Image (cartoon, grey):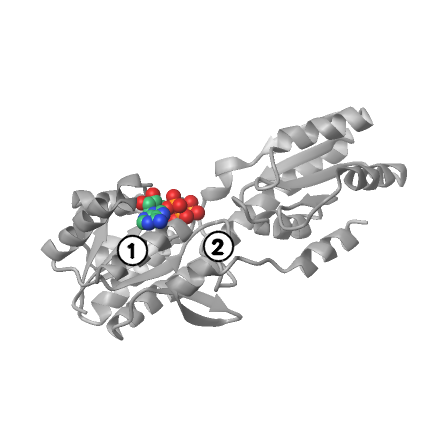
Amino acid sequence: VRHIAVLTSGGDAPGMNAAIRAVVRKSVYHGLKVSGIRHGYAGLIAGEIEELDVGSVADIIQRGGTKLYTARCPEFQTSEGQEKAVEMLRQHHIDGLVVIGGDGSFRGARALSHRGVRTIGVPGTIDNDLPCTDYTIGFDTAINTAIDAIDKIRDTATSHERTFVIEVMGRNAGDIAMIAGLAGGAESILIPEAPFNMEQVLEKLERGMERGKRHSIILVAEGVGKGMKIGEQIAQRTGWEVRVIVLGHLQRGGSPTAFDRALASRMGAMAVDLLIRGETSKMVGIRGTKLIATDIDEALDTAHEIDLSIYELAGVLSI
Ligand code: ATP
């Protein structure tokens, strides 16, 4: 490989910049040419490609968002769109591509590798909803943002003796709700992976109040449904004053944590190593403390799993 390009695609996540920086600097270190593609696959089709050097990624390791911007691009899901992308890469003499994004972006990466472009995926999404990796870039920052919000809400919840429902992101995965709920000491956590009975949730809340609890915080993963609706159900049944907060895009922003910066730096560098070794259609992941590479095919065929023992523990500790 002689010329590597990098793009970010799908939802942005804190730490994507650190990954871009790692791809650029590792490539330069090995004497390779490296370019950045703006606006994900849309920018690739449109030719928004610019050569990057060591200095062009200075001062971004600590920044949230993505310097290369991101986009969703329906055109890239068509065969014509993919042809255009391959042609654009050929015109720029790019022979290796690093795609930082979620599962949709990996489907795009697989399509490109089937068309002969050496492509490696780096998992960047706050949702942590990808298989074949314990963590995705951005998840750690998002849960820290979430617990910061929970702590603040808890102060006012206690002072007013109120019940708060907090809706967090995660798409169809409950990872953010589960870990932020455990770390934030939420009274109840509702995630799509664990069937729950609203009646039991309500009984638990009432038992807590009878025991003298001054507040209740219920964390709802967006994959379960709208926090507003859950809040209404609780208010109707108990007659309590319930407040609902949707954390929303707050969770996507902010300076990445040390964990995310280190993870992104390692994963970005590994993607370059894989391209140098001639690999294609691989996704970088982490298992324990070790980086691993999995076939994108396998990754896309595997369901994301969460460790339900953590969910059960959160239930035990919030009794
Ligand atoms: P996140 O889950 O964080 O939002 P994502 O990568 O899953 O990230 P998507 O919007 O699903 O986000 O995908 C990003 C882009 O990847 C799409 O806009 C499209 O250009 C491309 N893409 C998605 N699915 C496919 C597919 N099946 N084939 C080719 N390209 C795809």
Residue 52's spot in the image, x, y percent? 19, 55
SS under mark 1:
helix
Decide if residue 34 is on the left or right side of residue 15: left
**Which residue in the rendered view is the most extreme toward the right?**
210
In the drawing, what numbered circle is on residue 257?
A: 2
The three-letter amino acid code for the residue at tag 1 is Ala
Residue 18 or residue 69, whichever sits in front: 69
Question: Where does label 1 land, which residue?
Answer: 111
Callout 1: CB less than 8 Å from ligand 1:
yes
Residue 94 badge: none
| In this rendering, the label closer to the viewer, 2 or 1 | 1
Q: CA distance from mark 2 to mark 1?
A: 32 Å
Using the image, determine if residue 197 lies above or below residue 286: above
Identity of the residue drawn at 48% across and 56% down: 130
Identify the image quadrant of residue 221.
top right
In the orientation shown, which residue stands out farthest toward the left? 91
Q: Position of residue 261 (x, y in %)?
A: 42, 58
Q: Residue at x 43, y 58 (%)?
A: 300
Q: Nearer the viewer, residue 268 or 129?
A: 129
Q: Classify the position of the N terminus by image quarter.
A: bottom left
Q: Does residue 142 appear in this view?
A: yes
Q: Is mark 2 within 8 Å of ligand 1?
A: no
User: In front: 9, or 152?
Assistant: 9
Eyeballing the image, is 146 above or below 264? Answer: above
Label 2 secondary element: loop
Dot 2 amino acid type: Thr
Q: Is residue 6 left or right of residue 250?
A: left
